[in-house]
Amino acid sequence: MTSRSRWRYAVVALAVVAGAVGCQDGDGGTKAAGASATAQPGAQATQSPEEAAKAVRAAYARTSAAKSAKVEMRLTVGGGKAPGGSTFTGVQAWGPVAADLKVFDSSYLADIPGAPVETRVVTAGEATYVDLGKGLTAQTGGKRWLKVEAGGAAGGDELTVQLTGGLTAANMDLPKELGLLAGSSAVKHLGPGTRGDFKGAQGYEGELPDGTFVQVWIGADGYPMETRVASEAGGTSTALTTKYSDFGAEAAVQAPPAGETVAFVDLLKRLGRG
């Protein structure tokens, strides 16, 4: 693959990852094979489905009221056109959805010649922005930020359509996920956690109406400690594990100046002309 083709291939993957982190709605698919993590050793499920749904609804109410939290996320993609992964840390908000995250340990960044080892992803309004760094401005017309419109990552590109089928399962709207899980007829209690910082937590899991699999560990304070979201579609499996802390953390998120952004579809056109 030529350097330009490799760059284009990788930036498509990066853009769809950004779209996945910023999206608000799942895309469907099926439960990823092996996605269901069992309860901690020695744990025993004791709650009925009704009691489990009630506990998840209570976490939904607390989370909705908090409006934001600090997060540590690990996104892993298997199979499909662009397997890989990225880690995100920072602040995430919901109602409306917004985020300011550092990205590192990313195979997608590593595949783009000249891209930074660590970068930043900002979600504000209806778009997510990726800081491509100064080293790539020659490829982007002098623009530093890649803009991915919510729901518009596909942009008519066949590769991106295939990637989006798996990646849009990553949902930033935590209260929405909890609400859907609480409403699921299949929500199941996993039992109490016994490992390390999971002591005192209770685990729950279930499959959402769109086929996305969700597992949540709720701490003794009633807030989610960790969620695991997984799906499989179009031959691509996606798993997103998110750890939460400091609910109610300040989330003053602003989009980059319009003059410093390049739209994802426009960047694809620039690369395609080469």
Image (cartoon, rainbow, N blue to C red):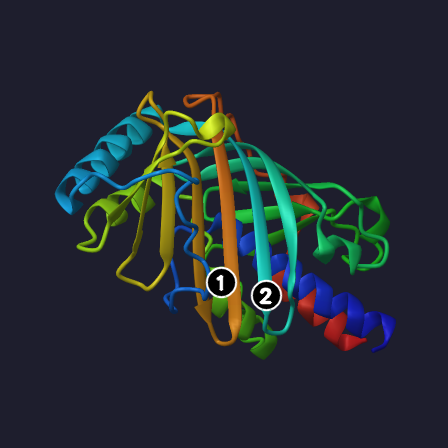
Label for residue 152? 1
* Quadrant holding the N terminus: bottom right
Q: Position of residue 40 (x, y in %)?
A: 43, 40
Taking depth in this image into account, of 96 and 172 the one nearest to the observer is: 172
Amino acid type of disc 2?
A: Gly
190 sits left or right of 249 in the view: left
Q: Which mark is residue 78?
A: 2
Query: In the rendered view, would you say 240 is above or below 246?
Result: below
Which label sits on residue 208?
A: none
Label tally? 2
Residue 56 picture location, percent across and down? 25, 38
Dot 2 falls on a residue whose secondary structure is strand
Mark 2 Cα within 10 Å, few/some/many (few <14, many 20+)? some
Image coords of residue 145 (percent x, y): 68, 47
Query: Residue at point 27% right, 35% down?
Result: 60
CB under 8 Å between discs 2 and 1: no
Of labels 2 and 1, earlier in sequence is: 2
Residues 244 and 116: in front is 244
Residue at 85% across / 58% down in the picture?
Answer: 113
Which quadrant holds the C terminus?
A: bottom right
Q: Which amino acid type corresponds to the residue marked 1 in the rendered image?
A: Gly
* C-alpha gap between disc 2 and disc 1: 22 Å
Label 1: how many Cα within 10 Å (few below 14, some 14–19, many 20+)? some
Query: Residue 45 vs residue 214: left or right?
Result: left
Q: Is residue 138 left or right of residue 11?
A: right
- Residue in the picture at 17% in, 36% down: 54
Residue at screen point 46% across, 42% down: 125
Q: Is residue 25 visible?
A: no
